């Protein structure tokens, strides 16, 4: 008996099944897993949204190689629009540029990724696997909100502009680390409705930190808040060296190596602080330069947390005042002292790529030629001041907390302590210091919904 009819019947059945599926499924199937990267990169900016999103998802799943495919295909277009966009462009060209930016952001997992070309994992297990394979530490960003959305917390927005867009910072992150971000909690958003069609939408409170992990995902160090690009790179390089030097050691030797690293870093920062203050004829024991706050209350007011970073405070304090939260008096370095130290450090200079992003973020009606320089100068001053505060106060607290920690430093427990004791936004307070029991509002239920 011949066996040939059976394969023929199977092929006919398969053909019929494919015809039926084609009739009932929507058009635009997802790209094949083995599709050629350049073709996927072209499809990722297709005017057809379903085709584009399918290609973007495939490129995203391919990791940094997917982002590199986008750069290889669309790099010339990116260079045309960033950092110096054309003076005039047809609406079709502008629409194509928006699709290119969208593709970069989605594949990278970061807003404004056309400027940074950084690929971010959002699952720590995937980051650990990539780190072990590459023999690189993990840089894990913890933020309020999401790095791939515009309304993430203020510090993470400033990271995208001042740090990740800087070519030297971006190259360091791309070549020496595996990147990962996770959300601490949603970021509070406030909308001010002026009643005539105009609305002002901003975020309130929240802070961000870069955790440095070894390739196994074990915590090595934490760099809190916003820094100028030069000191940020220096802090990262020191933590990277500590991560790699301790990575393969047995547990007792690893703990001893990291304790030595944090002890040396703490002593160095305290010595540098004393030298910097001495140049201004100040001492760390003076009331005006006391570095350690008193123990925080169970529910720190949002205004206290808002003072931790000048770059955030500039944006958030007017809103906090508007809703009845006046800035609190804390035992910080005085503003005048911080300004003098910041001017001496000169740590806030922005790269032209960062300035280009700031130009894109100007409010409607602003004139880049006249308004942008003042915005840039103000932002540079606040970055320099944040760098001073982080070096003199938050960074020593991190090293000191490590030295006081138990031998096994759990990342999530450490992060909870960081947000509670350093950033003053504990998880126990769902209102992030914006709803205080002793404040009268005149609103039913204090405005709570």
Image: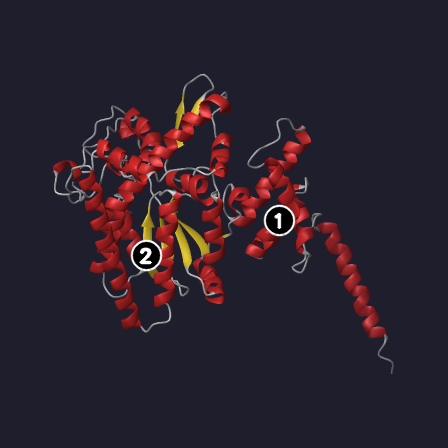
The percent coordinates of residue 223 (x first, y second) are 33, 50
In the image, 237 versus 116, the foreground residue is 237
Asked whether the beta carbons under mark 2 and mark 1 sit within 8 Å of each other, the answer is no
| Label 2 packing within 10 angstroms: few (<14), some (14-19), many (20+) | many
Q: In which image quadrant can residue 161 be found?
A: top left
Residue reaching furthest to the top: 196
- Residue 70: give its label: 1
C-alpha distance separating marks 2 and 1: 33 Å
Q: In which image quadrant can residue 61 be found?
A: bottom right
Q: Looking at the image, can residue 147 be seen?
A: no
In the image, 207 versus 372, the foreground residue is 372
Report the side of 1 relative to 59 (left or right). Answer: right
The image quadrant where one finds the C terminus is top left
Asked if 215 appears above or below 358 in the picture, the reply is below
Q: Classify mark 2: helix, strand or loop.
A: strand
The image quadrant where one finds the N terminus is bottom right
Q: Which badge, 2 or 1, is on the more N-terminal residue?
A: 1
How did the renderer colour the structure? secondary structure
Residue identifier under label 2: 221
Q: Looking at the image, can residue 52 be seen?
A: yes
**Residue at the image point whose x is 35% and y is 42% from the top:** 226
Q: Classify mark 1: helix, strand or loop.
A: helix
């Amino acid at each position: 008996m011949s066996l040939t009819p059976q394969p023929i019947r199977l092929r006919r059945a398969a053909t019929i099944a494919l015809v039926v599926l084609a009739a009932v499924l929507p058009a635009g199937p997802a790209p094949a897993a083995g599709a050629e990267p350049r073709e996927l990169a072209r499809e990722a900016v297709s005017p057809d949204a379903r085709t584009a999103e399918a290609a973007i998802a495939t490129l995203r799943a391919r990791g940094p190689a997917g982002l590199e495919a986008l750069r290889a295909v669309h790099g010339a277009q990116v260079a045309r629009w960033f950092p110096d966009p054309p003076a005039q462009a047809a609406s079709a060209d502008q629409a194509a540029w928006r699709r290119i930016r969208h593709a970069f952001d989605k594949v990278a997992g970061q807003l404004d990724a056309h400027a940074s070309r950084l690929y971010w994992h959002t699952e720590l297990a995937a980051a650990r696997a990539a780190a072990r394979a590459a023999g690189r530490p993990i840089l894990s960003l913890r933020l309020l909100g999401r790095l791939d959305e515009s309304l993430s917390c203020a510090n993470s927005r400033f990271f995208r502009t001042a740090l990740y867009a800087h070519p030297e910072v971006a190259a360091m992150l791309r070549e020496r680390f595996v990147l990962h971000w996770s959300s601490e909690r949603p970021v509070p958003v406030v909308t001010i409705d002026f009643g005539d069609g105009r609305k002002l939408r901003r975020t309130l409170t929240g802070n961000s930190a870069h955790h440095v992990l070894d390739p196994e995902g074990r915590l090595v160090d934490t760099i809190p808040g916003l820094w100028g690009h030069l000191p940020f790179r220096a802090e990262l390089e020191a933590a990277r060296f500590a991560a790699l030097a301790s990575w393969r050691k047995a547990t007792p030797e690893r703990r001893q190596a990291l304790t030595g690293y944090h002890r040396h870093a703490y002593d160095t920062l305290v010595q540098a602080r004393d030298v910097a203050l001495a140049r201004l004829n100040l001492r760390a024991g003076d009331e005006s330069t006391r570095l350690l706050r008193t123990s925080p209350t169970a529910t720190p007011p949002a205004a206290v947390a808002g003072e931790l970073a000048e770059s955030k405070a500039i944006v958030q304090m007017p809103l906090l005042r508007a809703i009845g939260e006046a800035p609190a008096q804390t035992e910080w370095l005085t503003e005048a002292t911080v300004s003098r130290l910041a001017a001496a450090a000169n740590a806030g200079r922005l790269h032209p790529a960062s300035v280009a992003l700031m130009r894109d973020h100007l409010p409607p009606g602003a004139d880049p030629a006249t308004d942008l320089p003042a915005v840039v100068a103000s932002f540079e001053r606040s970055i320099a001041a944040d760098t001073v505060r982080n070096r003199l106060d938050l960074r020593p607290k991190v090293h000191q907390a490590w030295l006081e920690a138990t031998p096994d430093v759990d990342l999530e427990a450490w992060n909870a302590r960081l947000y509670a004791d350093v950033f003053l936004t504990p998880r126990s307070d769902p209102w992030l210091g914006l709803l205080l029991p002793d404040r009268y509002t005149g609103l039913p239920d204090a405005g709570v919904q």
